[in-house]
Structure formats: C-alpha cells, structure tokens
Amino acid sequence: MQRQACFLLSIGLLMLALVGCASPPTWINEYLTGFQPPSSKTLAVSLPLAVGLLIALPENELSNRTTPSKESLDRMGLRIQKEFESPRMTVERIYPTIIIPATGLGTLSLERVREATQGGHCRKIIVVVATSQPARKVHYSMLEDQLFARMDAALVDLSSGQELATERGEDDYVLAQSYFFNAFSYPRLYYRTFTFAGPFTVVEGDPYKALGEAAFSGAADQLGMKLRQRLDPQPVAT
C-alpha cells in the first residue's frame, strides 16, 4: 500500500530536463577573432552614428525546432533597428543573416565580417550572434517547453578592427501542450513570469516555431534597447 502511494505521488512530481549538452558561450568575444576588444579606457563612441547590422546564426542552431528561419532572423534585425535608433543613431543597412560553422566559436573573423558586409559603405557594424537553450518540464498531464533566447552583439569598426562596445539581449518564453486537451485552448504560449493558466496566446501552426519567434523577438528588442542606452544614454529631443 505504501509503495502504491509513493508511486501515485511520483506521478505528480515535476521533472526538469535540460535539452542539450552545453550552454552557449557567455560573451560575443568568444565568437569574434582578429578584433581588438574594448578596454576600460576606450573612449565613448562619437555621435552621430550610422551603422550596418549583421546577424549570425551558429550551424548547430539549425537542428532546433525552435530556431527561426533566416528570413525571420532578418525581421529580427528590424526589431533591433527599431529599438536602437535615436535622433543621433541610425541603422543604414541590415545585411542578410549568415550561418557560421558548428557552435560559432572563433568563426567571426574580421575578414569574414568584411566579406558578409560587402556592397555597403558602413564601416561600423553591429555584429549579432543568435543562440538559444531549451529546457523541459514534464507534468502528469502537460508538457512545458521553455526557450531561453540570447543575442550577443559587438559594435565593430571594420577599418581599424576595433570593438567599440558589446552588449547582449535575453528573453524566454514557455510553450505548454496538454496530453488530453490540445483541442481546447492548447498549445499555449506565455511569458516566463506567467503560468499556463494565463494570460497566454493559443498557438496556431507550428508551436515550436512560435516559441522561437517569441523568445528571439524579445531578445532582439532587449538588445536594441540596451545598445541605444549604452551608446546614446541622453538622446537629443526631436
């Protein structure tokens, strides 16, 4: 009897499983090579500032069901641009997203960035690397997939090879799917601080793509805002 009670109790317990073997790298400098990193003595970036924007996606991310398409990542560039721009800062061009080998570590050389931004006249480029880390919670009647999306960025000068500033944006969303009630208000997508009870969005189409779009969009917004605050903390009023 005691064994049966323990078994029934174990059904209701929460199991947490991290998917994937390793966490993504911590800093943008782990992806860049051949650039001079900024130091504490680096002077503030002069304004006004016109930049190009390049997003890079590690090849390993392509195997994830939650990874947005290259076209979707290009749209993420528009979100970064919207949050980044101020009266003294503009994004003049968003370059097509590039795929970098394996995890992307040490693959973004000065020459590679110059090659990917050919055809533009911007010498200062915001280089962004998009990565993610999934986690899963299993309940007795429901499955929750959480996606931690991250965008690491550096503002670089292609003429000097100097990093001028670094920043990152992060966000995470949860996808809930029911074993029994997917025909009734499931799958549900909600922000990490909420629960499956709401508020939530009922997903139509591929739920994992929707999860990726939500998390990466939030990370893109965060990155653009934080770069603006770092580079132009006191924007001139229009």
Image: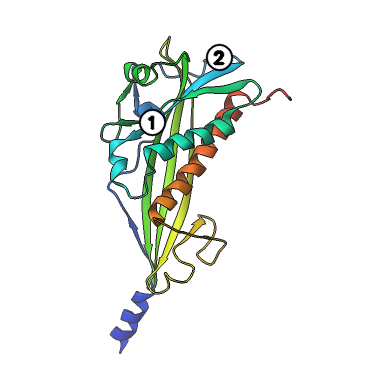
Residue at the image position 47 percent from the left and 71 percent from the top: 184
Residue at the image position 35 percent from the left and 75 percent from the top: 11
Where does residue 198 sit, x and y in percent of width and height? Answer: 55, 64
Kind of residue sitting beneath label 2 = Leu
Residue, far top: 159
Q: Are discs 1 and 2 less than 8 Å apart at CB?
A: no
Residue 131 image-quadrant placement? top left
Q: Element type at marker 2? A: loop
23 relative to 152, above or below: below
Mark seen at residue 43: 2
Where does residue 41 sit, x and y in percent of width and height? Answer: 52, 15
Tell whether 138 sits left or right of 231.
left
Kind of residue sitting beneath label 1 = Thr
Residue 226: in sight, yes or no?
no
Mark seen at residue 97: 1
Colouring scheme, one of rainbow, by chain, secondary structure, one colour: rainbow
Q: Quick one: label 1, few (<14), some, or many (20+) residues within 10 Å?
A: many
86 relative to 75, above or below: above
Q: Earlier in the sequence, mark 1 or mark 2?
A: 2
Query: How many labels, in total?
Result: 2
Q: Element type at marker 1? A: loop
Residue at the image position 51 percent from the left and 20 percent from the top: 51
Q: Nearer the viewer, residue 14 or 133?
A: 133
Where does residue 35 sit, x and y in percent of width and height? Answer: 38, 17
